Amino acid sequence: MTSVAARPQLGDEVASYVRDQITSGTLAPGAHVRPEAVAAELGISSTPAREALQALRAEGFLELAPRRGFTVARISGSDIRDMFLMQSMVGGELAARAARNATPALGERLREIHAELIAAAERGDLNALEEWNHRFHREINLAAGAPRLAWVIQLLSRYAPRRFYASIEGWPETTIDDHSGLLEAVIAGDADRARAEMVAHIEHAGEQLAAHVDARLQSHATQFA
């Protein structure tokens, strides 16, 4: 019973790992991705690795050709911008609903999380910074009381490598600034401002990633020209 329940979760973790390698540019377009190699890197069997790669093929991150196996699909900055455009629409609606549902308890939790995020940035703890960033957005999504929309944004956010933004120069400061305006809008119950703040925040993040992806594609093209 335990092993059956654990397999989907393990597959999700493997898919997330490979997805991050692709969207961050670590794995270039056309690169071969072997289930056995992924399994060896993560210390798991090849079965969940193969299942994860099949899932990534369905999502458009990988291609599968006879006798060639899995290769990385070409994802451009335009693809990233489109995904973040959709994410900003859903995220904006979630933020607006969270503002309408705002309570003193929500405000207290968001302020505590924001303080931890600032502290992590000040001490240069990028892993903690990203974790608190995730918690901040999760708190807003839960407060919106719209589980279907939260599910949609979770799917869309797969195009954002989890540890990518914390490593960009200046991004910790930008995150703090973006979250500050969003935090105040939600606490004030200002749905329109909360929507606008979230849309701007997500579009800003998407542009950072899109620029990075385009630069990596250009570098790859130049290298193999």
Image: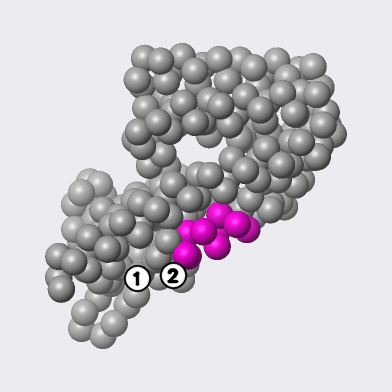
Give the Cα distance between marks 2 and 1: 7 Å
Q: Secondary structure at mark 1?
A: loop
Q: Which residue is mark 1?
A: 73
Note whether 63 is above or below 200 in the view shown.
Answer: below
Note whether 147 is above or below 30 in the view shown.
Answer: above
Look at the image and give the residue range highlighted in magenta: 78-86
What residue type is disc 2 on? Gly
Tell me the number on the disc at residue 60. 2
Quick one: label 2 or label 1, which is nearer the N terminus?
2
Pointer 2 and pointer 1: residues touching (CB < 8 Å)?
A: yes
Q: Residue at point 49% right, 18% down?
A: 118
Question: Residue 67 sits in which quadrant?
Answer: bottom left
Q: Residue at point 82% right, 31% down?
A: 190
Q: Residue at point 41% right, 39% down?
A: 165
Q: Residue at point 14% right, 70% down?
A: 224
Q: Position of residue 112 (x, y in %)?
A: 61, 15
What residue type is disc 1 on? Ala
Q: Is residue 107 left or right of residue 131?
A: right
